[in-house]
Image (cartoon, grey):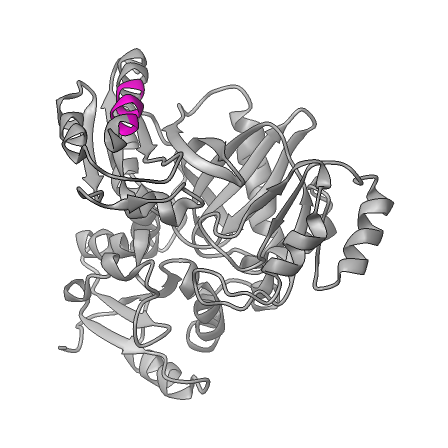
Amino acid sequence: MEMCLGRPAVIVDPYSSGAFFAEAFQRVGVPVVAVMSAPEPPEVYASSFRPQDFAQILVADGPDLTPLVDELIALDPRCILAGCESGVELTDRVAPLVLPELANIPEKAMARRHKGAMAQAVADAGIPSMRQICTDSVDEVASWLEQEGLIGEDLVIKPPKSASTDGVIKIIGGRDWREHFMTMLGSHNRLGIHNDRLMVQELLRGTEYAVDTATFRGCHTISSICRYNKVDNGPFMAIYDSMDWMPVEFPHADELKEYAGLVLDAVGVMYGTSHVEIMLTENGPRLVEIGARPHGGGHPRFCRLATGDSQVDLIARSFVANRPLHADYSLKTNVTVVFFLCRRSGVVRNRAALDRVVELASHHFSRIDIKQGDHLEPTKDLFASLAMGFIVLSHDDPGQIVDDYRAIRELEESLFD
């Protein structure tokens, strides 16, 4: 590929929503270079990679990053940003070597990727957080449960380096937690990472939000706040049902924004995009986790519909202006993403039913990857949801969106007829 002209933006693993960085930077006249953390994208992200969007593509080849760092220094980039979860660690390794003045705090790199270190950093900063432990020891978990008074309580077990709810399990009443712990320990998650330790957490109850941000020089600009609507699906917990963009001012909005800023500071985010997932409990906000990269699933595209802007566009303009851009977003129209949800196993015999979604009054976009004759299993995580597809609804009347959401679920139920 041709060498780029001008100081490029470098995006590490520009997959999932990271693919939108190319368009965002090109809009403001900045060429974009891709860095791949492996010769091929992880399978779950492969379909989102658009190599034609990049002036140059570099690959991290092996543990020695010296050749890659030398190539990046020669490019004189204006920024190095993580495109998706698989690129967070490599970004944090190379950015301080190439652009130390524009990197996130190196000493806190682990807290931006590893959920155990993340939780510790938040607790060390004095920010209210959930009770949790990260360990490879059943005995340590047992002692911790007794110490925290969580014996017999609902628990969550999840890998410390997974994404998209991969491997997240709810343990009702703490029953058989040892069996679940030992089954998951030593396995590999959907990103191919070895689960050598596991998180065990108290189950938070409340309403979950994602606060999406663009950070420049440690100043955090809110690009949107979304409300997650999640459901249990048999043994699988926190399955995405739908997601709503929230107006700029709604009850607890300021509380969520302040909490998100404290978390970003605690984990050392100075530059780039993040989304902070927060459970608003009866005791106040509690961190679920942070992703030090754009909100996934194509979020920037639909954020532009809802607000006229997105976190990838904000950060691109910030690097061109060389200053943080302070502005509260505004909701231009109501937008809801409906995720396909399979409740039971079965063979698709009525795929034609889903063709009717385009007739819904609030239909804006749909990606449907379900085919006639497919054998579907109960949805277990967001990766599984997105593999089936999703529908974006948009309308000035929120009641119309509610009606159309119900119609989608009815059509979905008829797939096995």
Majority secondary structure in the magenta region? helix
Q: Position of residue 315 (x, y in %)?
A: 35, 51
Q: Position of residue 147 (x, y in %)?
A: 86, 46
Q: Position of residue 227 (x, y in %)?
A: 45, 30
Residue 121 visible here: no
Where 275 falls versus 283 (above or below)?
A: below
- Is 411 included in the stretch rendered in magenta? yes
Task: State the count of labels.
Answer: 0
**Residue nearer the viewer, 155 or 248:** 155
Left or right of 234 in this view: 19: left
Residue 252, picture quadrant: top right
**Residue nearer the viewer, 109 or 162:** 162
Where 30 falls versus 339 (above or below)?
A: below
Residue 349, picture quadrant: top left
Left or right of 156 in this view: 12: left
Q: What residue range appears in magenta?
A: 406-413
- Is 276 included in the stretch rendered in magenta? no
Q: Residue at x 45, y 57 (%)?
A: 271
Left or right of 141 in this view: 102: left
Residue 306 visible here: yes
**Residue nearer the viewer, 111 or 273:** 111
